[in-house]
Image (spheres, helix red, strand yellow):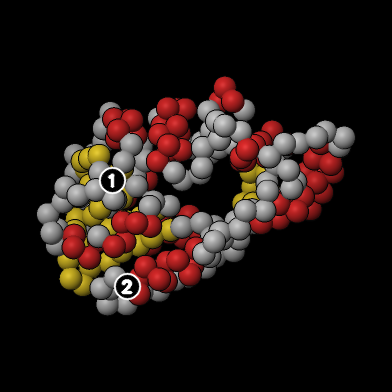
Amino acid sequence: MFRKFTIDYYLKFLTFYYGGIHLKNPTLSNYWLSPHSPEWYRQISKNGNAYIYPWQSTIDSPIAENIFDQLVCLHTKDKVALDFGCGEGRFTKKYALYAKQMIGADSSTQFIQTAMKTKPDNTSFIVAHSKHVLPFKRAFFDIAIIRKGPTSIYHHLPLYVKEGGLILGLHPGENEGKELSNWFPKLFPNNQHNIPIQQHLIKIFTKAPFRKFEIHPYHTIEYLHSPLDLIHYRCFGQKKRNL
């Protein structure tokens, strides 16, 4: 009952709220930052020094993030672990409760500075970029974690994860938010990925010297609570003064 009411209200209210308003494609703005670009990540760190979603929503099960976090906590127990693309270290510190040693790495200096303000004794943070020389010893880690981090790091991980070690990654799929292009074509232009993300990952994993790899897709429905949450969702990571 709650779910049906929420989605019905959401659709009707958005139709009323945007009725008669000419919406422009925000990506055409000179100030628009391409999502997941280095500039976009730097802007997120400036907006609040934390990678936290500003919109309110309700998410149906299965929730891939929760499943992933449970797997990471299980497999990091008493292990030396790397969390690459750790942001401000919110999840790194959670995983560190189970690990023997935890290192969080991110390309954003602001994120790393925030992460270092409070950290467990077994945890350290370092600025590192997946497209630059990495400051790690070879075959040092038992496990590497990429929670929505850069896929470019997969090429390098076989050098730094021990033989027989484990790499766990979580990435958004190419179908994320696909309905929004139909409902709000001006706000969400239909920009399909040139290469589907799953196909892109398979290509990377096939070329890398992994003993084996598995991909498990999860399909989840997220209900945004209000029109303002829709705007926050679309403009996440952009400069606030330009929204």
Type of amino acid under label 2: Lys
Is disc 2 placed on a helix, strand or loop? helix
Q: Does the rendering let one see residue 74?
A: no
Q: Nearer the viewer, residue 85 or 218?
A: 85
Type of amino acid under label 1: His
Q: Position of residue 96 (x, y in %)?
A: 27, 48
Q: Position of residue 125 (x, y in %)?
A: 23, 40
Q: Nearer the viewer, residue 93 or 126?
A: 126
Relative to 164, residue 28 above or below: above
Q: Quadrant of residue 201?
A: bottom left
Is disc 1 placed on a helix, strand or loop? loop
Tell me if 4 is positioned left or right of 53 in this view: right
Q: CA distance from mark 2 to mark 1?
A: 21 Å
Q: What residue appears at the point 21 percent right and 72 percent down from the top-left corner?
A: 164
* First along the sequence among labels 2 and 1: 1
Q: What residue appears at the point 18 percent right and 63 percent down from the top-left corner?
A: 159
Q: Give the residue at the far bottom of this rendering.
A: 211
Find residue 154 and name its label: none
Relative to 19, residue 66 above or below: below
Q: Quadrant of residue 15?
A: top right
User: Around disc 2, counting alpha carbons within 10 Å, would you say few (fewer than 14), some (14 to 19), or many (20 or more)?
Assistant: few
Q: Does the rendering let one see residue 85?
A: yes
Tell me if 69 is positioned left or right of 192 in this view: left
Q: What residue appears at the point 71 percent right and 52 percent down from the top-left corner?
A: 181
Find residue 129 and name its label: 1
Q: Position of residue 191 (x, y in %)?
A: 62, 53
Residue under label 2: 207
